[in-house]
Image (cartoon, helix red, strand yellow):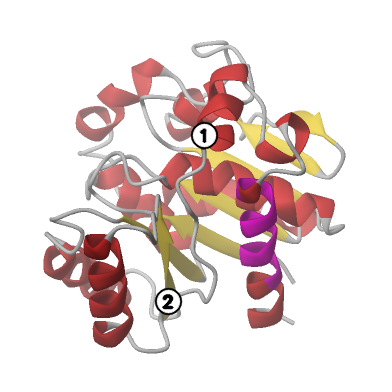
Amino acid sequence: MVQIITVLNHKGGVGKTTSSVNIGAGLSIRGKKVLLIDLDPQANLTLHFSLPINKTPNVYEALRGESPLPVTKVKENLDVVTSSLDLTAAESELSGVAGREFILKELVSKIKSEYDFIIIDCPPSLGLLTLNALAVSDYMIIPIEMGDFALAGMNKLFEIVQLVQKRLNTGLTQYRILLTKVDTRKTLHKEIKETICENFNGKTFDTIIPTNVALEEAQMQGEDIYSYNPESTGAAEYLKVCDEILEIFK
């Protein structure tokens, strides 16, 4: 049965897209059929695979009812639904549509049987696009960057999630926090890691994603980390995250 995972954090720069890309690619390496959906108007996931943004059809046209979800094969076992800069208009254009929070769920329902995992990369906001992702999802991954304000706004995030659970998706009860851009040599990072693990006991991945230049270089080259540098620390740690996910859903 397909597992649908939303990767979200309303803060930008936390490694959300990097995590979506490399978890998706890692699961495909593990033999799972994976679909990545770029639901962010910035289209960073689309660009990460060197796919053209604004090429039609894309997720924007699909949400507007003009096409089914357009799927692009990027490698063995890994497909992508590309995004568009026009997606910024979706929030206002769909605001008056009946059942607007369930548009993505309806689209996904037509193709989900083809996949083992569907991973949705959300925009850094808690608007209609993110609500659509949460309404269709079984699980959430919340990347958190190690910084002074790592936990800032988390209460608001969970308030929205609780509303989604109550009104849109009663099955959305599970999540896991992924610590990203961690430098264990820094005392501050160690302290933040301890605080998060204490506050969210049992809800964090055992694996942490270290600061790793290869992850940034892979993004600039339009590749996932396994294609760019499979021997890197970033590749090894993201594969460990994938194995944890497979253990969760075994």
- SS under mark 1: helix
Magenta residues span: 234-243
Residue that numbered label 2 is attached to: 204
Give residue 213's mark: 1
Secondary structure that dominates the magenta span? helix
Q: Where is residue 215 in the image (x, y as percent from the top left)?
A: 55, 36
Which quadrant of the rendered structure holds the C terminus? bottom right
Does the stretch in magenta take in 170?
no
Q: Using the image as rendered, state which of residue 88 and residue 124 is in the foreground.
A: 124
Q: Position of residue 41 (x, y in %)?
A: 36, 26
- SS under mark 2: loop
Left or right: residue 198 versus residue 20 is left
**Residue 135: which quarter of the image?**
bottom left
Q: Using the image as rendered, state which of residue 3 and residue 205 is in the foreground.
A: 205
Q: Position of residue 244 (x, y in %)?
A: 64, 74
Which quadrant of the rendered structure holds the N terminus? bottom right
* Point 13% across, 56% down: residue: 149
* Mark 1 residue type: Val
Q: Using the image as rendered, state which of residue 222 and residue 229 is in the foreground.
A: 229
Give the number of the mark in front: 1 or 2: 1
